[in-house]
Image (spheres, rainbow, N blue to C red):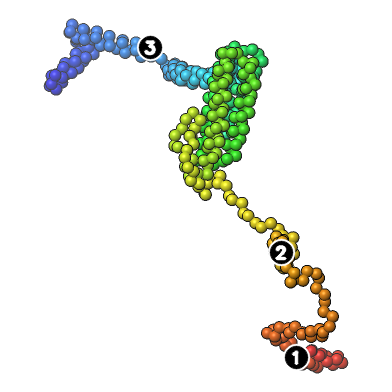
Amino acid sequence: MGVPGWFARERADGDRFADLVDGTASPEDDEFAHELALVGGLRELGAGGAPDAETRQRIRDEIAGRLAEAETAPKRRGHAVANLAAAAVALVLALGGITLLLSKDALPGDPLYGIKRAGESAALGLTFDEQDKAKKHLEFAANRVGELAELTRQDAPTDAYFTGLTDFETDLRAGVSRLTAIVTDQGGQTRLTELRSWAQQQSDRLGVQVGQAPAEARDKFAAARSLLDKVQARTTDLGSRLVCYTITTGSSDELGAVPAAGDCVRDPDSPDAAVPPVSSPPPSSTPTGSPSPTAVPPASSVVDTAAPTGPLAPPTAGTPPPVVPTPGPTNLPPLPTPTVTPKPPLISIPPLIPGLPPITIG
């Protein structure tokens, strides 16, 4: 609709409204008046149904409170879930600690033996020094030997022996390989000696248990003792190469580094190289300054009669030789001449006050 058309319509509506006010309206104007009345009624109805200011404020507060509760509910739910999770973790840790405590004396084949081994693995994971890890492996291997002895007293089934011996060999290989790697890198003949002695002790302990173990497990005992014999041979061979330039072949087996073979070119800088002892002559009982005794030749069957054989007699006649005084040193420096310091002259000051004696200085 253009502007002139809109203006004409608005003008016509204004004229109708004026006719309604003057009372000269036509039927068409009556219809228009009815429309105006309807619109006004609707406006009054809308104004009458609107809430007042107090009601609107109450509705607004109610809506704000509902929204606040809706935001707080997830937070409360999150705190509840976090508290429940913390309680669950605490319960698991408590039960785990009690279970580890109960599994301390578990034997191979017991339900808690797996938990005991898991605790040992955790202890190894918390150990960061290689030498300490090697010692822990050997400690666990020795524990398996003690557990096998307990199995023989309880007449345990064969499967329990196989489990204990398998775990013994696993810890033995791990401990020996780590320890020999340290010795190869840093030296340490003492460590090898201690490992050899330890392996001999464990072999003796297993030898005592073989007779009481089931017949089906005796081959497994023999294999474990054979592995201990290899450990002893390995420590001996490796110890003999620690003073050489070439200690290992560069390859490894189940027990770690393999010692080299062949000629040993000694490394003087090796910490395990033996230092030759310093030879010193035996102490002599002859006082210092006296001539050392000469070797006496063996006696001959021919006796020299020209030399006197008895003691020499002192001379009975003649004049004793004159005694010549020993001259003293002649190149001594002259003694210093003492210097005499002259006394200062006496100074006499007349008395400052009549009747007093004079003052003498010097």
The span from disc 1 to disc 3 (Cα, nearest Å) is 140 Å
The span from disc 2 to disc 3 (Cα, nearest Å) is 166 Å
Secondary structure at badge 2 equals loop
Q: Position of residue 139 (x, y in %)?
A: 60, 28
Q: Quadrant of the N terminus?
A: top left
Mark closer to the chain start, 1 or 3: 3
The span from disc 1 to disc 2 (Cα, nearest Å) is 88 Å
Q: Nearer the viewer, mark 1 or mark 2?
A: 2
Residue 240 visible in rendering: yes
* Quadrant in the rendering for residue 329: bottom right
Give left or right: position of 179 versus 319.
left
Q: Which mark is residue 109?
A: none
**In the foreground, 137 or 345:** 137
Secondary structure at badge 1 equals loop
Give left or right: position of 261 versus 99.
left
Q: Which residue is mark 2?
A: 302
Q: Quadrant of the C terminus?
A: bottom right
Q: Position of residue 100 (x, y in %)?
A: 60, 21
Q: Which mark is residue 342?
A: 1
Tell me what residue is drawn at x 62 percent, y 22 percent: 207
Mark closer to the chain start, 2 or 3: 3
Please name the amino acid that badge 1 sits on.
Pro
Whether label 1 touches label 3, CB < 8 Å: no
**In the foreground, 154 or 20:** 154
Please name the amino acid that badge 2 sits on.
Val
Q: Nearer the viewer, mark 2 or mark 3?
A: 2
Tell me what residue is drawn at x 14 percent, y 22 percent: 3
Q: Which residue is mark 3?
A: 49
**In the foreground, 241 or 155:** 241
